[in-house]
Amino acid sequence: MSKQKSGQFVVPGDRLGVIEEFVPGSGTYEENGIIYSLATGQALVDILSKQVSIFPKTRFLAVPKVGSIVIGQVRDAQSKTAAVRIFQIDKYPLSGFFTGILHVSDVSLRYVETMYHVCKPGDIIRAKVVSDKNRTFHLSTKEPNLGVIYAFCSRCGDVLNFGRVEMRCLRCGNIETRKSAQDYGKGELA
Ligand SMILES: [Zn+2]
């Protein structure tokens, strides 16, 4: 980031510069010598100290932590993992987003063979952050209040009706499988 770019609007994960040029300050993190933004806000550089920091746009500098309950939308689901775009942490909606990873071994206390029985892209899911190693937010849905809270029919896109294992589409009759939260479909996000 050059001096002219000080004050620019950034979102989490934006590259701000390298440690040879700048000192990472609040609202930033450094990985492999590169400084990134942790928050949505304005990037500021102190001319004397060369410290780059983020003045957050939101009052809370919400970042997922181990133990946080997060809400997100499933972006991608493979056999063993699903990628979740986190848009809410505990009760705080985010102006930016973080990506979380749910592995099939963290879905349920029982053995789950494939993520295709857990969630599909587009579903809204509630999960707990169990690890943030290497800035990757690893998620778990092992508790009864965790799992899919809204699911959409993969045939017609309508919201699926709740069932403990099988979810039925009332519009087209399609039956699908999810790992749903206890309060599926109740509209509670946190
Ligand atoms: Zn349907």
Image (cartoon, grey):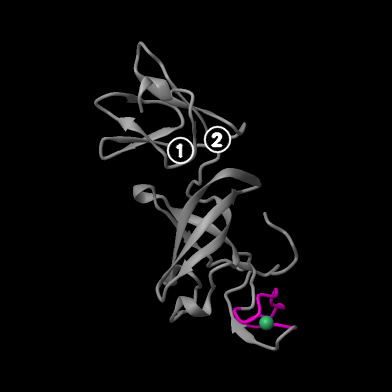
Residue 166 within the magenta-colored segment of the rendering: yes
Q: Residue furthest top?
A: 48
Where is residue 39? Give x, y as percent. 50, 37
For the C terminus, the quadrant is: bottom right
Pointers 2 and 1 in contact (C-beta within 8 Å)? yes
Q: Residue sitting at 47 percent across and 41 percent down? A: 12
* Disc 2 to disc 1, C-alpha distance: 8 Å
Left or right, 31 with reference to 62: left
Give the quadrant of residue 157.
bottom right
Mark 1: secondary structure: loop
In the rendered image, is residue 103 in sight? yes
Q: Residue at horizontal 41%, vertical 50%?
A: 132
**Residue identifier under label 2:** 61
Q: Position of residue 102 (x, y in %)?
A: 46, 64
Q: What range is drawn magenta here?
A: 154-170
Residue 97 vertical position relative to residue 75 in the rendered view, above or below: above
| Residue 168 seen | no
* Residue of label 1: 38
Q: In the rendered structure, which amino acid carries the disc numbered 1?
A: Leu
Camera-nearest residue between 125 and 146: 125
Q: Main secondary structure of the magenta part?
A: loop
Task: Report the residue at 60% width, 83% height from top.
Answer: 176
Q: Earlier in the sequence, mark 2 or mark 1?
A: 1
Q: Residues within 10 Å of mark 2 (few under 14, many from 20)?
A: some
Q: Quadrant location of the N terminus?
A: top left
The kind of residue on which mark 2 rests is Leu
The image shows residue 75 at horizontal and vertical percentages of: 50, 63
Q: Which corner quadrant of the figure contains ligand 1? A: bottom right
How many C-alpha atoms fall within 10 Å of the one at disc 1: few (<14), some, or many (≥20)?
many
Quarter-wise, where is residue 49 in the image? Answer: top left
Q: Is residue 93 left or right of residue 42?
A: right
Cβ at disc 1 under 8 Å from ligand 1: no
